[in-house]
Image: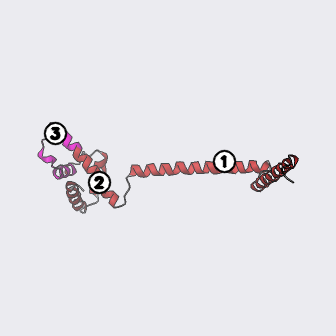
Amino acid sequence: MDRRFLEFWGNFLINAAKGQKKFEELSQWFSQDLKGFEDLTALFRKSYGLDELPENSADYEKAWQKAAENFQNSLRDYLSLMGVVPKDEHIKLVKKYEDLKRKVADQEETIKHLRMLLEEKGFGQGELVRSFQDLIITQTDQFQELMKALGLRK
């Protein structure tokens, strides 16, 4: 894991122990692409070495984007270690689950209707098996009669 992330996260947790407000600010800070909240931004810049670059330099924006990407990846890894799933993944899985639940319900309804149709036409499972057995017996008898007629069987 990125040592700068751990340094930032360690410093943040120490500061967060001083009050719940820091967590609320962190949440807003994430939703604003790591902008706003100057104390968090200053801590982030220091942890990732961005405070050494002038903000108006050409390299600063690239360095900021790379640091933000590294931070987001490290945060995902860190939260994954604690068993936390990102909200967007959770929502995607809930949607998939709901879609599958609807699909299963539709399929169960279709199966129910098909069974009712089979029973209406007298083709319940038992009746279907009996009909198939009768067909096999009839074909066997006809085959034996054919063999007798041809003189191949006594």
The percent position of residue 37, horizontal first and vertical second, equals 23, 48
Instruction: Say whether disc 1 or disc 2 marks the residue closer to the N-terminus.
Output: 2
For residue 26, the mark is: none
Secondary structure state at the residue bearing disc 3: helix
Distance from Cα at disc 1 to Cα at disc 2: 46 Å
For label 2, the residue is 75
Instruction: Say whether disc 2 or disc 3 marks the residue closer to the N-terminus.
Output: 3
For residue 59, the mark is: 3
Q: What residue is shown at x 75% (from left), y 49% (from top)?
A: 118
Q: Main secondary structure of the magenta part?
A: helix
The percent position of residue 151, horizontal first and vertical second, equals 86, 48
151 on left or right of 101: right
Q: What residue is shown at x 84% (from left), y 52% (from top)?
A: 153
Q: What residue is shown at x 14% (from left), y 47% (from top)?
A: 51
Secondary structure state at the residue bearing disc 1: helix
131 on left or right of 10: right
Mark 2, other Cα within 10 Å: few <14 / some 14–19 / many ≥20: some
Distance from Cα at disc 3 to Cα at disc 1: 62 Å
Labels 3, 1: front one: 1
Q: Are marks 3 and 1 in contact (CB under 8 Å)?
A: no
For label 1, the residue is 110
* Mark 1: amino acid: Thr
Q: Is residue 75 magenta?
A: no
Labels 1, 2: front one: 1
Mark 1, other Cα within 10 Å: few <14 / some 14–19 / many ≥20: few
* Mark 3: amino acid: Asp
Magenta residues, as a range? 40-65
* Mark 2: amino acid: Leu
